[in-house]
Image (cartoon, rainbow, N blue to C red):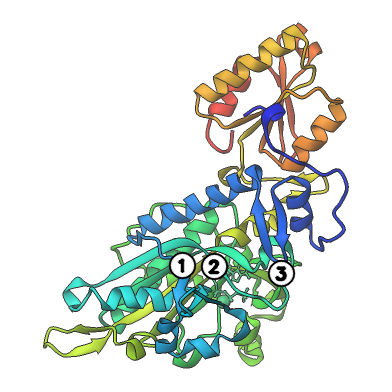
Amino acid sequence: MKLSQYFLPVLRETPAEAQIVSHRLMLRAGMVRQSSAGIYSWLPLGFRVLKKIEQIVREEQNASGAQELLMPTIQPADLWIESGRYEDYGKEMLRIQDRHQRAMLYGPTNEEQITDIFRNTIKSYRDLPRNLYHIQWKFRDEVRPRFGVMRGREFLMKDNYSFDFDYAGARRSYNKMFVAYLRTFARMGLKAIPMEAESGPIGGDMSHEFLILAETGESKVYCHRDFIDFNPIEHEIDYDADLEPIVARWTSLYAATDDRHDQARFEAQVPEDKRLIARGIEVGHIFYFGGKYAKPMGALVAGPDGEMTPVEMGSYGIGVSRLVGAIIEACHDDNGIVWPEPVAPFKVGLVNLKPGDAECDELADGLYRQLGAAGIEVLLDDVDDRAGAKFATMDLIGLPWQLIVGPRGVKEGTVEIKRRADGERETLSPESALAKLSRGPTG
Ligand code: ATP
Ligand code: MG
């Protein structure tokens, strides 16, 4: 992509309406624009990141054995009346009437919809387990939409739903998601800590929220400091194996969100110098709820003895659009965003310091073509501007690598390469720079 043709409306000024750094940077870097409170348009740069995150989530869901489908955003109210949640959900639900005066709603989540699909198709334990997910926009009329895409009213969520015959099966499904989430967030360069969360009327220990620590987080959390040093799971996972040991390790230390926190247990289990009381951003939530929807909605399956019992369900959410902001909260410096490579909108920002200069153009255009041919995503800054302004924009939008072509280097047969994360610079021949950028994520 060439910057001269790219729709990238960067702002030099700091937008006054944005309270936290990720929101400011997303506006300044031309990633999103607000449509109305908590509702955003995704501009090309932001949209690329959103899609990268979505794709990582999708790949990890698929690896775990979950299957993707797509349910609608607009749902009939009838389903929610059946489950008993239509009234309970209150003002957060956006209620809509169609031309026939039928009550509809913009889905805040999809338990009812998926339970309806399930009950109309699956009748026997032989067809279990099943795990279905989609990545779809949700609407919740939040009292206080704020912090940009982090607490929006319209937001993109990956949500899946597991169906099992018995509790043991539900536990296996839960463990798969637990591990898939650890891998998903690690792939985005994030340290997400699974924390015990409110489990609702069913109780039990199968409810975890995944949080990344950040001062701007809305959740108060209590956890063992050693979690910070836990190595993320990067190796391949055999999802058919027993995952209990991995889950046991990641739940062996105290970690709880505010609504689940127990001070006495915290003090008993965590030595004083290891107690961490901090703030966090909830990026995912996994939750077992048994027959909560299956019972009122009649999602029954026949067991080996022919007896019909409510299917055991769990639901699992990841805040895909919230993650864009959350990653920026975790990865930025004074000059702008510092994208982890797997979610970066482009891997390389190729800066031509003197567009119009025949030699600079030839080298920059050649590198642009070669990077493209090597399958490396590159944004070529071919705009006629001061060097300072060009670097400021590149730092702001946070591409992992800057490749700089200037008149002096051209004469000497060199280019400069700068790593955004630590500012480390190297002067190289164009060939060596290409070879370096063609290598894996660590370059
Ligand atoms: P929160 O406590 O932040 O309101 P929640 O418990 O209501 O979240 P869930 O119903 O568990 O959220 O939704 C799954 C995921 O969707 C959350 O972990 C979060 O990452 C994301 N999410 C929830 N509400 C919003 C929102 N208003 N804007 C953006 N993402 C959201
Ligand atoms: Mg939650």
Count every numbered label the image shows and give the total: 3
Mark 3: secondary structure: loop
- Checking the image for residue 266, the label placed there is none
In the rendered structure, are the residues bearing label 1 and label 2 in contact, judged by CB atoms less than 8 Å apart? yes
Q: Residue at point 39% right, 72% down? A: 161
- In this view, the residue in front, 326 or 248, is 326
Residue type at mark 2 is Lys
- The CA distance from mark 3 to mark 2 is 21 Å
Residue 412 or residue 345, whichever sits in front: 345
Residue where numbered disc 3 is placed: 217
Residue flagged by tag 1: what amino acid is it? Asp
Q: Nearer the viewer, residue 34 or 54?
A: 34
Residue at 69% of width from left, 66% of height from top? 38
Asked whether mark 2 lies closer than 8 Å to ligand 1, one says: yes
Sort mark 1 into few (<14), some (14-19) or many (20+) by Cα contacts within 10 Å.
many
Q: In this view, does 55 lie to the left or right of 402?
A: left
Residue 338 is situated, as x and y percent measured from the top left of the image, at 70, 45
Q: Residue 218, image x and y in percent? A: 71, 73
Q: Name the residue under label 2.
A: 138
Note whether residue 36 is visible. yes
Q: Which residue is drawn at 78% across and 57% down?
A: 21
Q: Is mark 1 within 8 Å of ligand 1?
A: yes
Up-down relation of residue 406 to residue 33 (above or below): above
Q: Which of marks 3 and 1 is in front?
A: 1
Image quarter where the N terminus lies is top right
Q: Residues within 10 Å of mark 3 (few under 14, many from 20)?
A: some
Q: Do tag 3 and tag 2 residues touch (Cβ < 8 Å)?
A: no
Quarter of image, ligand 1: bottom right
Disc 1 target residue: 159
Q: Distance between the residues labelled 1 and 2?
A: 10 Å
Q: How far apart are marks 3 and 1 (CA)?
A: 22 Å
